[in-house]
Image (cartoon, rainbow, N blue to C red):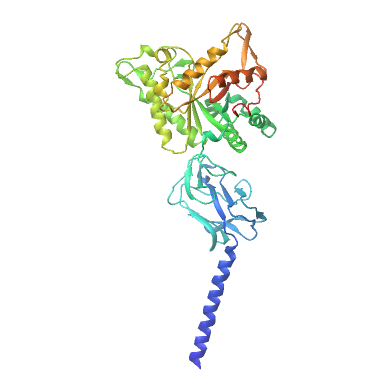
Amino acid sequence: MKIMKITLTLAIGLAVLACNKNSETESVSGYNGLVINEIAAHDESGVASWVEIANGSSSSISLDGIGLYLFDTYFDGKQIWTGSGSLAAGERLVVSTEDDLVTGIESSADFTLVLGKSKKKAIDSWSNTSLGSLTEAGSYQRLPDMTGEFRVLTYPSKGKENKIFDVSDTKPNAVWMWSKYMDEWLEDDAAVLKEIKALGYDHVLLNFSGFENRPKIAKQFIAKAEELGVTVHAWTQCFYKDGSWINPVDDDNNCYKQEIFDDILAHCKKYIEEFGVKGLHLDYIRFGGTAYKHCPSSEITGTGAVTEFCRQLREFVDTYDENIVLSAAMMAEDNASYYYGQNHYQMGRYIDIFMPMIYRYQANNLSYTDSWCIKWTKYFLNNNNGRATCWSGLTTYNYPSGNTVVGLDSETILNDCKVMKEGGATGIVLFRYGYGDFPDVNELWND
């Protein structure tokens, strides 16, 4: 009788355990497809931390009764967010320390994040132990979106599909922009930025002074631009500083000045890691007409210095494996290699987009013909080593009297864009915002 009682008790206990186990399974089985999709863990740098939760299923999923639980040096499963409402199929929700997330997450230390009914009933979980810390602007992202493994990217995709940037997915229309206009573009809920995007300009080349002198505003500008689908490139000044040209050739010692290269590389690293830019635009990647004077040997030349820096920057950027775009402002003049050190064929091994400054309007109301513009566009298309495309750069202003600058109307600018297209350009770049009425270029490349 006693043995029968023990056996019965054991059976009931096993049944309860089985029931509990089944209950636990049932408690999360209705959440298939709900995942932690992206994590920006920046507590150590004082930047907002945020987590993106995504529904990769084909049905709506309730968020009631679930939460995010953090395991790290300080917390053993602390609930840092409580869900409510529902998430439609394919929808994503971003929770941040700026709103619903009760504490930040630090990427420089190991942590585990659990999405679940409780800290022990996980719907999804992930630990950063294998990937380490983030760059200041970066995030951990599932690739492919919602289904893949996590990896570190320097640019986030907050609230959007996780994917490696591909410039071919964008419209090849860009604007050179002085940093002083950042505030204006952000005013009234970014009305100007929205207008520029609506007109078909998917790229902004933001002058380096914004990154160096007003980093907080630059980060706000980049975040808003990315939210609206506008890619920001850091408009970087290479061999020119404070009104003077910088000679990257050590003529006396027959070598290149690596310290100059390293300084520019350090700034590019900052623009990528701290600001999350997807492009680097090289301005003044040349000499001021004196490249031929800096050739101490057949191996060390002015032209070689320009090419060598492009090579080093390409090698550096490729370490990120994120399709960060390199573009260069090019001189549309004869003998560019001799005077400026720009050998287009050699540079084309490393540069993605040539942006030749085909500025047809000159002082005293002079201008170049359509055939001149077409000639130079074709030149860059035919002398790029097969890698670089050509986005022709054109001015948005004229000089009707002396050196007085007057902005052009949109019809004139659009006609100039079409001239560049006739020459074979695959994109256009307007110099610059602040002059002229920008035309709608959404249909420019459709045919």
Q: Looking at the picture, does residue 330 appear above or below residue 211?
A: above
In the rendering, at what x and y percent does residue 350 appear?
42, 28
Q: Looking at the picture, does residue 178 appear above or below residue 278?
A: above
- Residue 370 sits in which quadrant? top right
Q: Is residue 316 visible?
A: yes
Q: Residue at x 63, y 18 (%)?
A: 415
Q: Quadrant of the C terminus?
A: top right
In the rendering, at what x and y percent does residue 342 appear?
42, 18
In the rendering, at what x and y percent does residue 12 appear?
54, 81
Q: Residue furthest right?
A: 188
Q: Looking at the picture, does residue 103 appear above or below residue 277?
A: below
Q: Is residue 74 visible?
A: no
Q: Residue furthest front?
A: 447
Q: Could you tell whether 440 is left or right of 77 in the image?
A: right
Q: Could you tell whether 9 is left or right of 250 in the image?
A: right
Decide which of 141, 148 is in the foreground and name it.
148
In the rendering, at what x and y percent does residue 425 appear?
53, 23
- Residue 422 sits in which quadrant? top right
Number of dots carrying numbers: 0
Decide which of 429, 3 is in the foreground and name it.
429
